[in-house]
Image: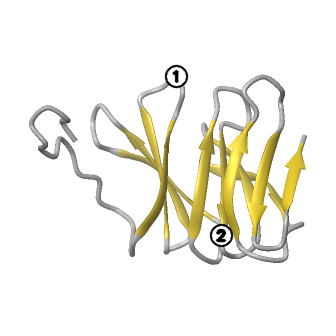
Amino acid sequence: WDLETNQVIRHYHGHLSGVYSCALHPRLDILFSGGRDGTVRVWDMRTKNQIHCMAGHNHTVHTIAAQAAEPQVISGSQDCTIRLWDLRKGQSLKTLTNHKKGVRCIALHPVEYTFASCSADNIKKWK
């Protein structure tokens, strides 16, 4: 959106169903979106081109966190998993399966190399 004119600047099309989450990379002109189709899509904000369609979740992607360090993308899903993604290859590096309910939120620590995830069953801290 252009906040001064209240006009849409750009549309991104690719998800097969609704989009439930998005995040911006802290250093690159990259947008991440997560949807009900279980994918995390990576978009070049300058060209509007889709860079990757990262599939792996079996249900809605509710949360995405992006950081400059590896792994650059972390996603949480209604399928009770968290995935760590390799941004260069567009592939899953690791799947964390410790939640018993859908993952709703991921928060990155601003200094430490850790993050927290939350679901209806609990909150977890990861290193």
> Which image quadrant for residue 16?
bottom left
Number of labelled discs? 2
Q: Which residue is mark 1?
A: 27
Residue 57 is tagged as 2
Q: Amino acid at mark 2?
A: His
22 displayed left or right of 98: left
Q: State which tag comes first along the sequence, 1 or 2.
A: 1
Callout 1 amino acid: Arg
Instruction: Locate residue 11, reporting x and y percent.
Output: 23, 51
Q: How is the image coloured?
A: secondary structure
In what quadrant of the picture does the N terminus appear?
top left
Q: Quadrant of residue 17?
A: bottom left
Viewport quadrant of the C terminus: top right
| SS at mark 2 in the image | loop
What whole-number distance in Å separates the C-alpha atoms at marks 1 and 2? 26 Å
- Eyeballing the image, is 7 above or below 13? above
- Residue at 79% in and 48% down: 116
On the image, which quarter does residue 71 sit in?
top right
Q: Residue at x 61, y 40 (%)?
A: 87
Residue 106 rendering spot, x and y as whole percentages: 69, 51
Q: Kindly identify the residue that appears in the image at 44 percent across and 35 percent down.
A: 30
